Image (cartoon, rainbow, N blue to C red):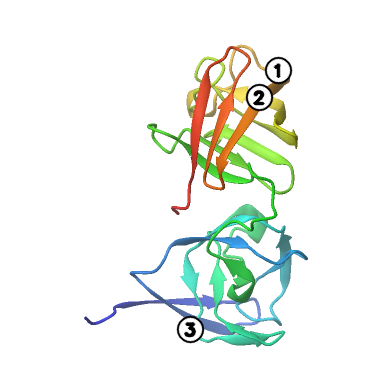
Amino acid sequence: MRLVLLFFAIVNCHGIIFSQSAPTQQLPIVRYVASKEGLNVRAQPARTGDRMGALLYGARVDLVIRSENRETIDGITDYWYALPAAPEWRHGNGWIFGGYLSETMPEDTSPVLGKWKIEGQDKLFHWDFRPDGKMNHGNPASGGGLFFGGNSFMGDWTLQGNLLTIKAEYFQTQWGKPSEYFHNETIEIIVTIINRDRIVLRFTDSSEHILVRDNDP
């Protein structure tokens, strides 16, 4: 079977063109940051590229482009991968080195870390717990959720034992419009860990969400 390649060209501020290619059968993909020191995000797919920021250990990343050439860093040879364009990457693609990524969430991270789908529900209604202590539920960018009357929210999370505490910063209704009860809220949830890819959240009203890890881009 012939493998079709997609070609991309990116021009940096110095006028240098980086030609990128990615097998259509492989990308986009989800990976996790496996370096405990974190992982630099660069403006170009090279160790000499301008540093744009960093990702923390255990961060979930969607990879959308693969570099044409590989590079060897610390004795590891791999490709560079581009993240989706976002404001934090100057509204362009940030690049990360593939040698410090893993296909699965690192075993020694918090058991709730990552992005989760609610079993039996559309993946729009997700839970996303990030390594910087931030989280969101539903889809705060466009609205939609299953909590507090169908509103989504964002906030900070901590897990002590099996008690998950969320300090929600605000709520939204559909399509990003503020809800009529716009306020802060502390939410306490009991977590039952079935395995690394399946957990149960039990709320104070005894209702539950069964979550499965979302490894799809």
Residue type at numbered disc 1: His
In the picture shown, does residue 113 fall above or below 199? below
Q: Quadrant of residue 28?
A: bottom left
In the picture shown, does residue 39 fall above or below 72? above
- Residue tagged 2: 189
Tag 1 or tag 3, which sits nearer the N-term?
Answer: 3
Residue type at numbered disc 3: Glu
Q: Which mark is residue 96?
A: none
Left or right: residue 170 compared with residue 19: right
Q: Nearer the viewer, mark 3 or mark 2?
A: 2
Residue type at numbered disc 2: Ile
Q: Residue at x 74, y 47 (%)?
A: 132
Category of crowding for the residue at label 1, using alpha-carbon neighbours closer than 10 angstroms: few (below 14), some (14–19), many (at least 20)? few
Q: Nearer the viewer, mark 1 or mark 2?
A: 2
What is the CA distance from the residue labelled 1 to the residue labelled 2? 19 Å
- Residue tagged 1: 183
What is the CA distance from the residue labelled 3 to the residue labelled 1? 48 Å
What element does badge 3 sit on?
Answer: loop
What element does badge 2 sit on?
Answer: strand
- Residue tagged 3: 68
Q: Is residue 142 visible?
A: no
Q: Residue at x 69, y 52 (%)?
A: 109
Between residues 160 and 126, which one lies in front from this camera angle?
160
Left or right: residue 188 compared with residue 206: right
